[in-house]
Image (tube, rainbow, N blue to C red):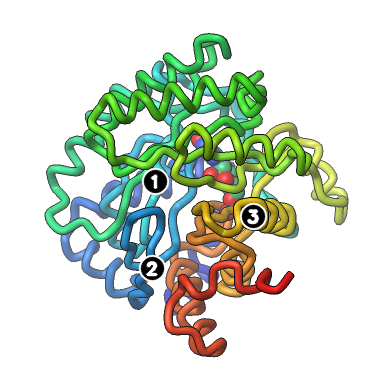
Amino acid sequence: MMSLLWNLLVRPVIALQDSEKAHSRSMLSLKLTQKIPPINWLLKLSFRAKELPCSMIEWSLRNPLGLAAGMDKKAENVLAWENLGFGFIEVGGFTAMPQSGNERPRMFRNSAHGALINRMGFNNPGSEVAAGTLAAVQAKRKNPTMKILANLGRSKSTSNEDAADDYCTSLARLWKHVDGFVINVSSPNTPGLRELQEGDALKSLLDSCVSKEKECGGGKPVLVKIAPDLSNEQLEMIIDTSRGAGCAGIVATNTTLERPQPLNKKSSAFISQSGGLSGSPLKHRSTEVIRHIHNHTNGEWPIIGVGGISTADDAWEKITNGASSIQIYSSLVFKGPSVIKEIVNGLTRKLKENGLQSLDEAIGLALRGE
Ligand SMILES: Cc1cc2nc3c(=O)[nH]c(=O)nc-3n(C[C@H](O)[C@H](O)[C@H](O)COP(=O)(O)O)c2cc1C
């Protein structure tokens, strides 16, 4: 019902708006609804999925579906995401310094491809302000039902040589207010950032972040987020380096620089935009990356699978290829919040169909005996 209403009433209005304006208006509406108890109750009633308990890293989650980084860049809608029923969310990316990001327009949408292209460039209030926002929201959460990861990036004005300081500054500021960290070395929109995925640069950055986390008190997992545009050799080097540095897991993947074949004139104009592409055309590649990580680590290292998930079948594919949990961004834009329930309830059905008792049994199922 809610999904029908979304398609009939909300989607056509959003389609008429500039992508970033539509996004900002949606974030503002969520922010306002958080303050109105009857609306919170309605959100829970309409959108919350049934519980699908699972474990990720050392956490017990109410379901394996998370919100991907970049949707809530100010961490201003935590309570709304919790009401909508996510098992976990990733807020940010945050940088040590506040940034306005790249020039607009910088976010593009194409429904024929089911894809977005963005070149936002880490527009965010900076980790100091974000820490204040998160401290205030944490004070209001009496019985938290979802975990919060902070996505960390490098400020544009900081060089790669000084990147560790930038990431560690944000990590220390946010440490008290979140449950874990994702070190993002894979955004295509900050010049040079992806170079931090390479050899010694990656090792030194991750060593610093893991040490800083311990210095702050320890016990909050540090994960790394990678690009889909990597060779198998590069991927294996990143996995080995990150595990060696003590990272608790990996988020695969960020947006891609690859483009799908054009479908028509409108789609040609869309795919010619520079930036990172997300949504349906990323689905296959991100699953390949997840499968490779799972095989390379014998399924022993937690993978958060993200890229082109828009149905329960897509989520199942990611999990059976090795992801222990999943995240969405683009499908929330195209389908609205009912996609959360659709995916989680669909996964529960998939478990039953396959005669499995728990989601943990499904992780890597498609690869057993390969
Ligand atoms: C507008 C936009 C902003 C994003 N910002 C970030 C970010 O700050 N940090 C990050 O790690 N990923 C960011 N991402 C990538 C998403 O977290 C996710 O990895 C990607 O969109 C693929 O998932 P999807 O196909 O479900 O959208 C962003 C994506 C979009 C569309």
* Left or right of residue 4, residue 218 in this image: left
Percent of width and height locating residue 134: 25, 37
Instruction: Please report the residue visible at 74 percent of the width from the left and 32 percent of the height from the top.
Output: 274
Quadrant including the N terminus: bottom left
The amino acid marked with disc number 1 is Met
Badge 2 crowding class, 10 Å Cα cut-off, few under 14, some 14 to 19, many 20 or more, is some
- The quarter of the rendering in which ligand 1 is drawn is top right
The amino acid marked with disc number 3 is Ile
Percent of width and height locating residue 224: 52, 38
Q: Dot 1 corresponds to which residue?
A: 27
Badge 1 crowding class, 10 Å Cα cut-off, few under 14, some 14 to 19, many 20 or more, is some
Tag shown at residue 330: none
* The residue carrying mark 1 has its beta carbon less than 8 Å from ligand 1: no
Q: Is residue 19 above or below residue 187?
A: below
* Left or right of residue 10, residue 41 in this image: left
The amino acid marked with disc number 2 is Cys
Instruction: Please report the residue visible at 76 percent of the width from the left and 43 percent of the height from the top.
Output: 232
Query: Which of marks 1 and 3 precedes in the sequence?
Result: 1
Percent of width and height locating residue 359: 46, 73
Badge 3 crowding class, 10 Å Cα cut-off, few under 14, some 14 to 19, many 20 or more, is many
User: Secondary structure under badge 1?
Assistant: helix
Q: How many marks?
A: 3
Callout 1–callout 2 Cβ contact below 8 Å: no
Callout 3–callout 2 Cβ contact below 8 Å: no
Residue 141 shows up from this direction: yes
User: Secondary structure under badge 2?
Assistant: strand
Instruction: Please report the residue visible at 58 percent of the width from the left and 33 percent of the height from the top.
Output: 241
Q: Dot 2 corresponds to which residue?
A: 54
Q: Dot 3 corresponds to which residue?
A: 290
User: Secondary structure under badge 3?
Assistant: helix
Instruction: Please report the residue visible at 34 percent of the width from the left and 24 percent of the height from the top.
Output: 212
